[in-house]
Image (tube, rainbow, N blue to C red):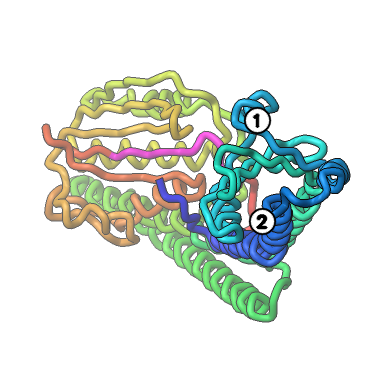
Amino acid sequence: MHLKPKSAFGQTVLLIGILLLINQVFSYLSVTYYLVRPNYQQINTLLANQIKVIFLKDSDHLDPGLRERYFASTGIRIYNQEQAEQRGLNESTYYQTLSNFMSEQLNGEAQVRISYGSPYIYWINPPQAPNLWVTVPMHGVGDLDYSPLTNYLMVIGILSVAGGWIFVRRLNRPLQALLYAAQEVGRGSFPKPLKEEGTSELIEVTQAFNQMSKGIKQLEDDRALLTAGISHDLRTPLTRIRLASEMMPEGQEWIREGIINDIEDMNDIIDQFINYVRQDHQEKPEKVSLNNLIESAVKARSIEEHHKIDLHLGDIPDVELRKVAIKRVLDNLIENAFRYGSDNIEITSGYDKKHRKLYFMVRDFGAGIPEDQVDSLFEPFKQGDKARGSLGSGLGLAIIKRAVDMHYGSITLKNMPEGGLQAMVCLPEKARLLTPISA
């Protein structure tokens, strides 16, 4: 367990708290050494002087009436050990520091105890009479209340931490907004320009980010327009070629079928390009059952007799998803598993309650993919050709990853020990943002 927070906000608040704690400690030490300790030293000096007066040499020759008046006016009493215990000596508190100071004042070993009440009673066992205890009432000592000082320091500390928290929160709010906006841009979304606020450095960073986001959005729009234009222009000659092939004379059916197959492959590649630049951000999220989407995708493949899909669906809650985008993920994963893996595949779904995530896995029993190529397969135009003999544009997994990232999920590929490749998609039960964003 790491006690040190990782965020700048938490670290700054922690730093302010530590500095305030150090300030509080030094304040208490200052009060103790420069206020409390001198007061108690003065009290001890007065008490020591009282003891010296009581045990003056030749004090027995003094007027007895004078001694009685002195004890009556000061409230000082002298008891032997038994009398002292009867009057509360054992309930008093012994103080080593006061005893040491008193011993220095009286030039011998002395003990000092205090009984708390109104007034405070100081019990002193002087070196002049080790078998006796002298009690001196101290009026006003018990009235010294340091709680206002303690409360004052606590209030100052709380207000300082609260002020620091507000300051740091205000300072980190633009950074938090910048973080979320950067994550959105990384997922292919382009939020509205951020509000320029905070310190001058943060304003400059926000301005630079807004300019960067605007430039990336323009590049994305240009790429989408270019791809759509090329796709549209290519379909027209492909359509003419297909019509021309249909008019070929009899006896050349094999040539016509080859041309038609090539045209269909080219149309599939064009569709992949269009799907890659189209990110489905305009689709409105809706609450659906992931298991129903899986069953729907499996049902669409049931017309192919040589393909077999084993389902292992767990109990999972309904979540808000972009239905078309997730369906495209399922279709692409199933198509890849059949095309490059095996004729029989497995689809498993489940719910991770601890991390509040849904997941589904598509597994084939083919040759798998070399480990050094797994991480690069999600990049556009990357393929595992050597292992799986694939043909095409290499955009299938890139399209899948974009759709999964748009849902704040993750996708991983793993070669199974028993053979085959497993694709696992994890989706959060509640994503931070799943609202339509203008692209």
Q: Position of residue 2 (x, y in %)?
A: 42, 50
Q: Nearer the viewer, residue 250 or 231?
A: 231
State the extent of the magenta-drawn residues as a range: 423-431
Residue annotated with mark 1: 84
| Separation (CA) of disc 2 from disc 1 | 24 Å
Report helix, strand or loop for mark 2: loop
Compared to 293, does 24 lie above or below?
A: below
Find out whether residue 126 is within the magenta segment.
no
Residue annotated with mark 2: 57
Q: Residue 285's image quarter?
A: top right
Q: Nearer the viewer, residue 37 or 84?
A: 84
Q: Nearer the viewer, residue 94 or 217?
A: 94
Q: Nearer the viewer, residue 223 or 284?
A: 284
Circle number at residue 257: none
Q: Position of residue 67 (x, y in %)?
A: 81, 46
Compared to 45, does 314 lie above or below?
A: above
